[in-house]
Image: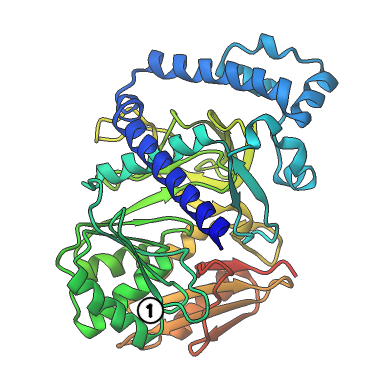
Amino acid sequence: MRLDFLSFMLDKARDIWLTARGAAYARTTGRAAERWGPDARLGYQNTRVQALIAFAARNVPYYSRLFADIGLDAGSFASVEDLKRLPVLEKKVVLEQQDQFCSYESLRGSIRLRTSGTSGHPMQCYASTSQWVVEQGAIWRQWGWAGYRFRDRIAIIRSYRPKPGEPPVRVDRLRNWVYLSPYHLDRKTVREFLHFLRKWRPLFLRGYPSSLALVAQFAEEERISLPSLRGAFVASETLTPLHRAAVRDAFGIEIFDHYGQAEISCMLHECEHHDGMHILDDYAVVELQPTADPARFRLIATNLHNTAMPLLRYDTGDVVRGALRQCKCGRSFPVVEAIEGRSDDNLTHAKGHALPSVNFYTFMSKLDGIRRFQVVQEADGRIRVNLELKPPAGGAAGTVEGYFREATGQPVEIDTGATFVQTGDGKCPAILKRRT
């Protein structure tokens, strides 16, 4: 028992130390990076790439072999452009050889992460302490764009999964955060959550888009306001127009979207202008590879800081929409229009081609009778659309059925009484594809 307590206290102390370093990064390097010119940005990335390649060649078994097999000298890598001498790294390769991508020199003290497995293939990843500092710093920086200051109150509806007998609410007094279980979003518990939050007065919400939207819809129905709120942070799911509208209508606040992965390959953030997603190029080198659709690009990334498990030119499996441009906020981080989510979570037409998910989000957002939706495509192609309707629903269900049948060429079933499918980590994806 004493050893368990000691271990707990050491973990707490380390967490505080890394959090403090992350906050310091956000105020120094992170803030400076927002205003870098092209030369400063490229110089920083080139220096990081040179160091990362040299480290990987010496310490990471997969890359030691790869460089030898294809005859590359790590010392010849001088710039970001040289990364293109390496092949794109597919997730299946990492899954098959996970231990070969680890640097045992950096694993000690690293942070272990797991992908959610929504693609059907969960994966264990590691972040070095230096990477975790940058990770935290990048998040603190985005929160600062929304007006957050350290120890402002945040209500978090994600990740927390209470054990049997534990309450669905847990307060972190150090950070001034409260965790609310996304696994307990029945009407009775959500009502209790909302009344608790009215008294606790958080300034920000944080959670999965689906969880925040569900709470917002209930709050609007019950006419329960949270006047203390200034904004909301979301991640881990595709943010749809319906999610945004639900939170805005109920609480009068805007959402700040975050994109990242457990593989720690790149990060994109939405700023206070809500006009696209900033690519954080102090965090990673990002390549946008063309697809058959000229407006959509595969997201290929090389993290610049993670020495525990470096993944060079990693194919995230996700797709972004829109060419690179600058934001009117004035920050130098380039912007894309949107993240469309996993390329393999687009619906598949009966003829075999993928259908961009954004088309379906746009269609559903224009129907007044839809409160919430989830599209599930089975392995054989059949589609089930789970709908939660709101008055006046009219013929919304029939309209949805006809649209999906015509758009996909697949058999379509509409279910207005189904339980929405929730993944093991509490997410409720708007589009879900069964692999088996």
Q: Residue furthest front?
A: 2
Taking the spot 67% from the left edge, 76% from the top edge, the residue there is 382
**Quick check: 205 above or below 417?**
above
Q: Position of residue 15 (x, y in %)?
A: 44, 46
Number of numbered discs:
1
As drawn, is 106 to the left or to the right of 188?
A: right
Question: Does residue 124 appear to the left or right of 429 in the view shown?
Answer: right
| Percent of width and height locating residue 62 | 77, 31
Q: Residue at x 74, y 73 (%)?
A: 380
Left or right of 146, for residue 54: right
Instruction: Write the residue at 65% across / 74% down.
Output: 410
Relative image position of residue 114 (x, y in whole percent): 61, 53
The one of 253 and 1 positioned closer to us in this rendering: 1
In the rendered image, which quarter contains the C terminus?
A: bottom right
Q: Could you say which is closer to the camera, residue 45 or residue 406?
A: 45
- Residue 425 position by quadrant: bottom right
Q: Secondary structure at mark 1?
A: strand
| Location of residue 192 by image quarter | bottom left
Residue farthest to the left, as pictured: 227
The residue tagged 1 is 370
Quadrant that contains the N terminus: bottom right
Above or below: residue 51 compared with residue 195: above
Residue 206 visible? The answer is: yes
Characterize the local packing of mark 1: few (<14), some (14-19) or many (20 or more) Cα atoms within 10 angstroms. Answer: many
Q: Quadrant of residue 300?
A: top right
Q: Position of residue 423 (x, y in %)?
A: 57, 70
Residue name at image x 57 percent, y 33 percent: 306
Left or right of 158? Residue 250 is left
**Could you tell me if residue 323 is visible in this image?**
no
Amino acid type of the residue tagged 1 in the rendering: Ile
Render colour scheme:
rainbow
